[in-house]
Image: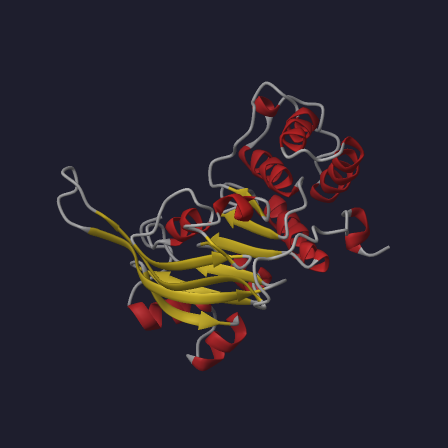
């Protein structure tokens, strides 16, 4: 049995907004924060452009404060860009946000979990909010819980979960509507190495369902293990983009941490 057989493999066949092969496009994206309480203008995202192919795991790699989460928030419609354009599934985030919301699943940095419900109750609740049929919720829930090793703890209240378990549950909730595009914002922060490896294996298995995954991380090994391509972000700017192996070879380095250090003069883990 292949690893994907435990996952509902009938991925959403929602029609994208154009025939463009890219799942996501970002063109000269900028987000600037100003105001009376801000002493100096802050350029959180400073003229970034990239595209993401359908079915690709694409990583946004950089230290805290680099602009990774800001980009995710713009693409999900949580905040508005100052300048530039962004398209998700062919739809403009400024004009077609309701259509974009039908295409995406979001796993935010902070787990959106009801602490006094158990795992199954949380998953069922969000599945119902997404209007997923009960039999589909149960089928997907069982597969996800099994693959992430949460089945035995699925009747335990979420308030008794570890930080890593909460993040895994958050990931399942993001997937319960079977979205073709998935945003994972630092999905393995706080996980111990064993749970992190299990989660990596799970995320990688999602490629077999042809999902497009945007992953933010500051873990070098995570980006190298999961991503088809990475965009290395620093101070709101795109400093490098490409497959991890190619970037490492191009800059004659041992890993992406060395690539980042060579390009920027500082380490990705600075400020974390």
**Which quadrant does the N terminus fall into?**
bottom right
Give the tally of numbered discs. 0
Check the image and report above or below for 84 versus 70.
below
Q: Quadrant of residue 268?
A: bottom left
Determine the residue positioned at 59% across, 47% down. 196
Determine the residue positioned at 77% across, 37% down. 136
Name the side, left or right, on which 247 lies relative to 36: right
Name the side, left or right, on which 263 lies relative to 1: left
> Can residue 220 be seen in this snapshot?
no
Q: Quadrant of residue 270?
A: bottom left
Horizontal and vertical percent for residue 245? 53, 74
Name the side, left or right, on which 209 lies relative to 247: right
Instruction: Please state which of residues 60 and 74 is positioned toward the viewer in this rendering.
Output: 74
Q: Quadrant of residue 237?
A: bottom left
Instruction: Please state which of residues 32 and 242 is positioned toward the viewer in this rendering.
Output: 32
Horizontal and vertical percent for residue 98? 52, 43
Horizontal and vertical percent for residue 42? 22, 51
Determine the residue positioned at 64% across, 43% down. 175
> Can residue 144 be seen in this snapshot?
yes
């Amino acid at each position: 049995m292949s690893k994907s057989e435990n996952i509902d493999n009938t991925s959403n066949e929602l029609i994208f907004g154009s025939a463009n092969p890219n799942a996501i496009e970002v063109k000269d994206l900028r987000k600037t924060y100003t105001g009376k309480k801000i002493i100096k203008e802050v350029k959180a995202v400073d003229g970034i452009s990239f595209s993401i192919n359908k079915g690709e795991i694409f990583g946004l790699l950089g230290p805290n404060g680099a602009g990774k989460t800001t980009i995710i928030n713009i693409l999900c419609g949580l905040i508005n860009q100052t300048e530039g354009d962004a398209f998700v599934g062919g739809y403009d985030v400024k004009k077609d946000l309701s259509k974009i919301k039908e295409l995406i699943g979001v796993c935010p940095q902070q787990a959106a979990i009801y602490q006094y419900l158990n795992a199954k109750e949380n998953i069922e609740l969000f599945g119902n909010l997404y209007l997923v049929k009960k039999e589909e919720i149960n089928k997907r829930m069982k597969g996800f819980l099994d693959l992430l090793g949460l089945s035995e703890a699925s009747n335990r209240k979420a308030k008794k979960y570890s930080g890593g378990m909460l993040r895994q549950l958050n990931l399942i909730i993001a997937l319960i509507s079977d979205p073709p595009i998935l945003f994972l914002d630092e999905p393995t922060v706080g996980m111990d190495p064993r749970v992190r490896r299990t989660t990596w294996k799970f995320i990688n298995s999602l490629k077999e369902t042809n999902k497009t995954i945007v992953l933010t991380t500051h873990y070098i090994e995570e980006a190298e293990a999961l991503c088809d391509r990475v965009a290395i972000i620093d101070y709101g700017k795109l400093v490098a983009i490409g497959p991890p192996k190619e970037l490492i070879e191009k800059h004659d380095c041992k890993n992406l941490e060395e690539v980042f250090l060579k390009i920027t003069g500082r380490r990705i883990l600075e400020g974390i």
